[in-house]
Amino acid sequence: MYTRLWSIGLLLSVMPLQAGSLEGMIEIKNKRGEKAGDCSQAVVFVENGATPLAAGTPGTHTVLLKERVFDPPILAIVQGSTVDFPNEDTILHNVFSLSKTKKFDLGLYKQGESKSVTFEGAGLVKAFCNIHADMVSHILILENKFFTQVSQQCSFAIPAPPDGKHTVSVWYALGKGSSTEVEVKAGQASGVKLAVVHKRDKQKKHKNKHGKSYKKAY
């Protein structure tokens, strides 16, 4: 019996501790302090500190051009990833961005065609269609793999970040996010609550790729 207990103790001593996790909620309120907004339009991520976190493996993602909208309208990816923009509409689209993080212009293309963009640097990219002013896509390119899109129930979980103190931030498409410092410990779930200010119900108007106003109808 003692031998068996000793063997179990030895096994436990050499087994790695289960990594910690970040779990929490976000709360979206307007300027009057009332609950507002859509939590699924928020992304929670761990920021890089003095020691960069694991970058993750770049992948290929898809944003459909369908029924005159980008689907999904919000996408979080690791830097170096590629996004395909297939046109599933019977009309032409022209996806472009003038964002500092990544400028591109895919030109006009028709149903059944697809064009792609690789996002090398971290930051936010707003993509539009040069024909349809209401089409907006937010692509959040992150430096490491520790991020997640928030659920419609306003909860989130980021598994296995390294132990230690980290800055956790929330980005929100229709307002202002926030940040907080959290300490992650092996085998423990670190609870996080992040506040978000809802500022508007619709995206701000923008110009076309030539810096001019959109035509009223197509």
Image: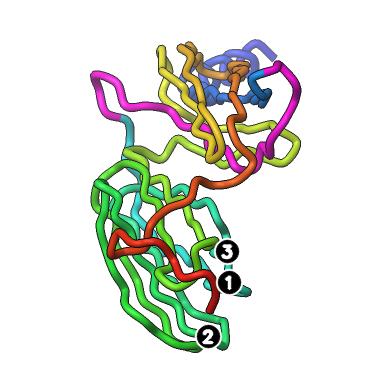
Real-space Cα distance between discs 1 and 2?
Answer: 9 Å
Q: Amino acid at mark 3?
A: Asp
Disc 3 marks which residue? 71
Q: Is residue 166 left or right of residue 209?
A: right
The magenta span reads: 32-52
- For the residues labelled 1 and 2, say whether their Cβ atoms are less than 8 Å apart: yes
Residue at image location 62% in from the left, 25% down from the top = 23
Q: On the image, numbered disc 2 is attached to which residue?
A: 91
From the viewer's perspective, is residue 116 above or below residue 196?
below
Which amino acid, by three-letter code, is at mark 2?
Answer: Ile
Q: Position of residue 192 (x, y in %)?
A: 60, 18
The image position of residue 167, as x and y in percent, is 42, 18
Q: Nearer the viewer, mark 1 or mark 3?
A: 1
Of label 1 and label 2, which has the lower sequence position? 1
The verdict on residue 95 being magenta is no
* Residue type at the position of mark 1: Arg
**Dot 1: few (<14), some (14–19), or many (≥20) neighbours within 10 Å?**
many
